[in-house]
Image (tube, rainbow, N blue to C red):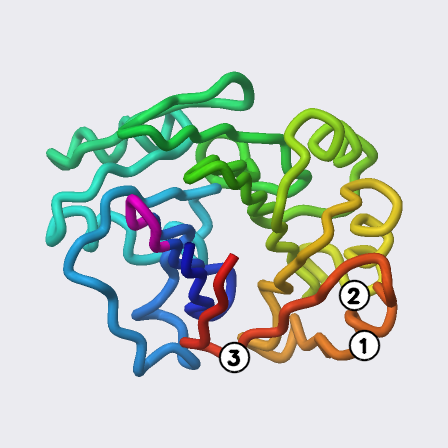
Amino acid sequence: MKITYLGHSAILMEGSKTILIDPFISGNPQAKNISLPDRIDFIVVTHDHSDHIGDAFEIAKERLSTIVTQHEIAIMAQEKGLNAEGMNVGGPVELSNVKFYFTNAVHSSGTGHPMGAVIEMEGKRLYHAGDTGLFSDMRLISDYFRPDLAFLPIGGRYTMDEEQAAYALKNLLRVKKVIPIHYNTWPPISADPMRFRELVGDAAEVIILSIGQSTEI
């Protein structure tokens, strides 16, 4: 499975299906040169803040993608004539052999409840924390889902910073591979991914990707 970092919290997963998470692209000043594949099967939106819902509706309309998101955002999408599957924190929605779970996230939102997402595809489980602060039930995510890879925000102010994300990884999530997200888009969320790597130490492999760069899992 190919994983590409598109800046901020946006992730592209390419395997048996192509999945786009929190596609804040056109509004991201650092993601001007990003191009998306012609086929995007699913778009996952963790909450409705503009730097996460981003271009989801426009991309879904152009590429006939299905939006997988919280119930309230799904209704908004359906009212615009888009394909959308609404859900909440709990058991999965399975679409084309891909399972989508939503988890809690400690944050705010204009509509519905902010969430993280666990996506199961090709025998791998990937945890995208969305926007969240540190919370102890991350241990439940670890115990139940046992993710192979996590995407964790490190930018501080609105989410965990480097220290809190490292604590979450080492003491709660215990995931062996992690990609830092949600940092350095604007000055208020400046962070140093190398410092995050140092804080994590040998507890996990920290994969630092520049915008547009990919890795394989």
Q: Amino acid at mark 3?
A: Ser
Q: Residue at image x 72%, y 62%?
A: 157
What is the secondary structure assignment of the residue under circle 2? helix
Circle 3/circle 2 CB separation < 8 Å: no
Q: Residue at image x 79%, y 51%?
A: 169
Q: Residue at image x 23%, y 44%?
A: 41
Q: On the rendered structure, is 170 left or right of 23? A: right
Q: Which residue is mark 3?
A: 210
Q: Which residues are magenta?
A: 14-18
Quick one: 94 or 104, which is closer to the camera?
A: 94
Distance from Cα at disc 3 to Cα at disc 1:
16 Å
Please report whichever mark, 2 or 1, sits nearer to the chain's N-terminal start. 2
Q: Quadrant of residue 79?
A: top left
Distance from Cα at disc 2 to Cα at disc 1:
7 Å
Q: Is residue 132 above or below residue 165?
A: above
Determine crowd level at label 1: few under 14, some 14-19, many 20+ residues with C-alpha closer than 10 A: few
Quick one: 148 or 140, which is closer to the camera?
A: 148
Q: Which residue is mark 1?
A: 195
Q: Verify whether residue 177 appears in magenta.
A: no
Q: Quadrant of residue 154?
A: bottom right
Q: Main secondary structure of the magenta part?
A: loop
Quick one: 145 or 59, which is closer to the camera?
A: 145
Determine crowd level at label 2: few under 14, some 14-19, many 20+ residues with C-alpha closer than 10 A: many
Could you say where residue 172 lies in the image, as x and y percent from the top left? 83, 40
Could you say where residue 9 lies in the image, as x and y percent from the top left? 50, 60
Q: On the rendered structure, is 174 left or right of 13? A: right
Q: Residue at image x 79%, y 33%?
A: 139
Q: Which residue is mark 2?
A: 162
Circle 2/circle 1 CB separation < 8 Å: yes
Q: Quadrant of residue 164?
A: bottom right
Q: On the rendered structure, is 38 left or right of 170? A: left
Please report whichever mark, 3 or 2, sits nearer to the chain's N-terminal start. 2
